[in-house]
Amino acid sequence: MTVPTPRRASAMREFFSGVGFLFRGFRIWVTAPRLMLLGMIPAAIVGLAAIAVLVALIVNIEVIATSITPFAREWSEVAQAATHFAAGLALIVASILVIVNTYTTVTLMVGDSFYRLIAAHVDAVHGAPPEQQSQGFWRDLRRGIAEGLRVLLPTVGLAVLVFALGFIPVAGGVIAASAGALLGGWLLVVELSNIPFESRGLHLTARRRTLRGSRARALGLGAATYVVFLIPLGAVVAMPAAVAGATLLTRSVLGEDARLSTLATTTEKAKEPPHER
């Protein structure tokens, strides 16, 4: 008799499963509201600077768009206007990608202790992994900064790509925005999962490799968080939930919840009297 092979979840189902981690992260507001409020403090401080940069860009976008498209000076007025609009829109979309990911990296550094408490709370509720011994504050800090920069550097290249996509006729803005959400979301989830992976003794290379193994699920959380961060004050409210969601994602991709479930079932069976087995 042929045993049927279980079907793997589709990429779309995995993607929406990842989106669900963000909503599950928001539930931590119910179980640990004080921790979540603490997590909003660094998010709000860094968020003010991020908003100031974005507002300054938008206010001066016409001048900047004109200066970066000198090739259109001899064109007709209509062609110039269309080119400047496309350049301005593409620049805003690309800049948002850089701002969102820089904001996340800096916020996690500023509020490191707060977000570690949130991640630890999630692990405590769902079954904490073995504790990893710290290698010292300064060594952990240096590694955190180095890894943050390694995540941020690709953002510049991706921003250039998104900027170029914005010049595609008619649908350029939509294509650039979609690419920004997906590409930026991937970098976002790699950064957000830093704390839960690090608490398990797994650093950037292992983190990327593990997340690639569940790419659709990781992209779901990253893209959803990216979109929520674009809502006014959304990044401030969602940052603690995103860290909680990233912790849940980490548990999922490492198979910790499945192992704990199997262990619990085995333990229960072991406790049963012999005549009940």
Image (tube, helix red, strand yellow):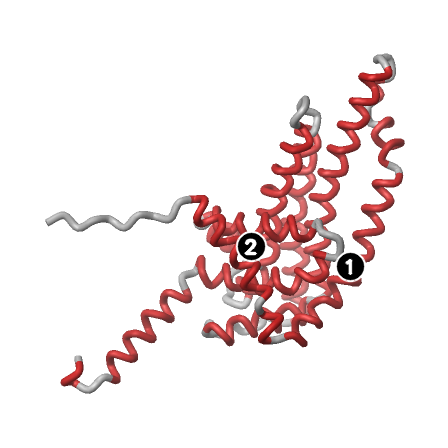
Identify residue type, mark 1: Val
Q: Earlier in the sequence, mark 1 or mark 2?
A: 1
The location of residue 89, given as percent across then percent down, is 76, 33
* Residue 111 appearing in the image: yes
| Side (left or right) of 1 relative to 272 | left
Q: Residues within 10 Å of mark 2 (few under 14, many from 20)?
A: many
The location of residue 29, given as percent across then percent down, is 62, 70
Q: Quadrant of the C terminus?
A: bottom left
> Which residue shows up at 80% across the image and 17% down it?
79
- Mark drawn on residue 240: none
Seen in the picture, residue 120 relative to 62 is either above or below; the reply is below
Check the image and name the residue furthest to the left: 1
Label 1 sits on residue = 46
Seen in the picture, residue 268 relative to 19 is either above or below; the reply is below
Seen in the picture, residue 19 relative to 34 is either above or below; the reply is above
Identify residue type, mark 2: Leu
Report the Cα–Cα distance between label 1 and label 2: 23 Å
**Regarding mark 2 in the picture, which secondary structure is present there?**
helix
> Which residue shows up at 69% across the image and 28% down it?
164
The image quarter containing residue 148 is bottom right
Closest to the observer, 78 or 102: 78
